[in-house]
Amino acid sequence: MKKIAVKKGDILQRKGEINSKAYIVESGLLRSYTIDDKGKEHIYMFGPENWLVADTSEPQIPCQLFIDAIEDSVINVTTKEELLQNGPDLKVLLRRLNTMQNRIVMLMSSNARERYEHFIETYPKIIQRVPLKMIASYLGITPEALSRVRNELSQK
């Protein structure tokens, strides 16, 4: 495992690359996302401190996701194989799987307000660190819909 510092905006992985790396965030904030054929960004996940960020594609298959730094960050870089060989931290992996499962269920069955409340529960320490347009992208709603939800919640 190798520790590196990355700057805000640095791209660690591009969609279509062959990349077998996994990133464990020590400090800062990463995100993984895709860009559709129309150029619209869809955020898959955020990676705050102590989170594992990686594309789950097989090492020889092109990645589906971009990974970049939202903030200046210090990350531990390893390969997926090394992560598994060294006995992965099951708590970290299970937390990531649970977060993804909850998100999929939420996207299938929740309204915008419920999605936002779920985001706050999942990522309580990054709400002020992420631009609202990125939160809207993660939630699968427009920035305007997010603004309405935030206004509605602030009036309660």
Image: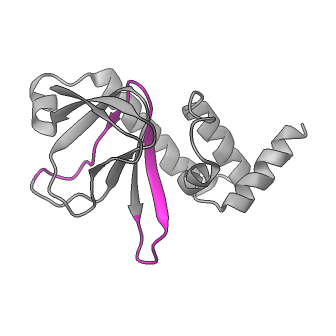
User: Would you say residue 38 sits in the magenta stretch?
Assistant: yes
Q: Is residue 23 above or below residue 111?
A: above
Residue in view at x 53 percent, y 49 percent: 105
Q: Is residue 77 above or below residue 26?
A: below
Q: Quadrant of residue 85?
A: top left
Could you tell me what secondary structure mostly forms the magenta stretch? Answer: loop
> Relative to 11, does residue 22 appear above or below in the rendering?
above
Image vertical order of residue 17 relative to residue 129, above or below: below
- Rendered image quadrant of residue 89: top left
Highlighted magenta segment, given as a residue range = 35-59
Instruction: State which quarter of the image contains the N terminus.
Output: top left
Q: Residue 35 in the image: x percent, y percent?
A: 41, 66
- Please state the horizontal and vertical placement of residue 76, each as a whole percent of the image: 24, 28
Q: Residue at x 29, y 30 (%)?
A: 75
- Residue shown at the point (40%, 48%) measured from the top left: 9
Residue 91 located left or right of residue 17:
right
> In the image, residue 56 lies at what x, y percent?
25, 48
